[in-house]
Image: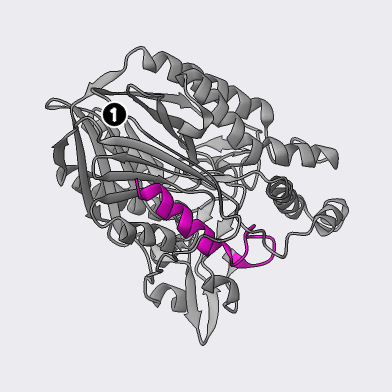
Amino acid sequence: MYKVKLLIAFAALLLATHQELYAQQLKIAVFEVNATPPLGSPVAYAKARSVTDSLSARGIVFITDSLPVVFCVVDWIGISNEGHDVWRKQLAAAAGTTIDRVSVHALHQHDGPRCDYTIERIMMEYGLGGQSIDNRFTNDVIIRAGGALRKAMNNAVPVTHIGIGQAKVDSVASNRRVDKDGNIVTRYSKATDSFLVNAPEGVIDPWLKCISFWNGKKPVTALTFYTTHPQSYYGQGDVTCEFVGIARNDLEKKLGIPLIHFNGASGNIAAGKYNDGSVQRRVVLANRVEAGMLKAWENTTLTKLKPGDISWRTVGAALPLNDYIKEDRLRHMLTNDSLNIHMKLRAAEKLAWYQRNTSGLLVDVAALRLGKIWMLSLPGESFVEYQLAAQQMELSGVVCTAAYGDYGPGYIGTKKSYFENGGYETSDLVSGTGPGVEEVLLKAIETVLRQ
């Protein structure tokens, strides 16, 4: 387990805000809108050719005597850079709060859309607009989400108790980075190679956590948190909320209350050990996740909320840039006719991150404290080690991690991972951050948890 260093890395934390909410009465409001792309609209690796399952954007607003706090999660592969900004601004305006009190995440389904106005502007500059991102569609969803949030606040419900429960999920998550004779071999979301299937799970977080909110004896809503890439099979444009979304939707119907699911720090976690990519495995994985959700719900312990139990802290962190990220090289890739659209998109992604990073814009790390429960918000595809480290920092309570916030940095590895031989996550043009990110991100996590 990584120990938090006592010294702050240079330029690691340039902004920090902390405000106790001290509410006499917490109220919450939940909202949801359809986020399914139209047929023909680009999703992660193809154009949408069918809709297997509808997608949604779901959120919760915490209303106290102070400014509201918003958490939102969308069934898309990623929301990054200016796309992330626009989402937060829209929801902040609807909630009557400030952008630093809005946390927006993706669930990272690989047959879902992308949202990034920076990337799309770069693609348009090189005559590639509309091939990977549909601005008209994403903007429509953002506007509708703001409207749904605004409407939901008129029907906010008082909360008297908060519940927390957890359960282990059996045979879903496995670490993607497998050691083979001193080299790292990547075990992706599906695997049929016997070595990868038989290799140990590796470092994961097997615990699914459930936070619930109650008005007296009546449950109002529940939030679940589990850590894995949510892919079973994908890539042909058959839109789906994948096995985590299917599990969420099924349990929501059984419980009869809104259910909002967040993906943890899954950069190096996927279902590869337990998934051969067959159609049948999606159902199997969904059933296993739903079983974990239900068990966590059944294991819930309730605590009465008191004045002063709620606080919010956010820190702007300057994540160090990966040495691979060079503007001239990325622009050359965008003009190279021998590269396909996917490679050009990857170049545009990293150029967008380069522009944001070098302009001095920071990436937010945040935490909402609810008594002895913390909802930790992390950027990008953070490695699971950051989530596990956060749990060790706050042993007096329970830390529930929502990653895939600003997707701009891409994969965020540990320091060690950048020096290992092999492994997709920290390879060329995949991770936007360098090995110094570990010290910066751990310090930011420590800062927001020490409330």
Using the image, determine if residue 292 lies above or below residue 198.
above
Relative image position of residue 236 (x, y in whole percent): 60, 47
Give the residue displayed 72% in from the left and 64% down from the top. Answer: 324
Tell whether 52 sits left or right of 425: left
Tell whether 366 sits left or right of 24: right
Using the image, determine if residue 220 lies above or below residue 343.
above
Mark 1 Cα within 10 Å, few/some/many (few <14, many 20+)?
some
Residue 65 or residue 122, whichever sits in front: 65
Residue beneath disc 1: 22
Give the residue displayed 47% in from the left and 48% down from the top. Answer: 378
Relative image position of residue 373 (x, y in whole percent): 27, 44
Quadrant of the image containing the C terminus = top left
Relative image position of residue 235 (x, y in whole percent): 59, 50
Tell whether 5 sits left or right of 209: right
In the image, the segment drawn in magenta is 426-451
Relative image position of residue 266 (x, y in whole percent): 45, 56
For residue 340, say whether it is visible: yes
Judged from the image, the secondary structure of the residue bearing numbered disc 1 is loop
Give the residue displayed 57% in from the left and 58% down from the top. Answer: 411
- Please identify the residue farthest to the left as the structure is shown: 217
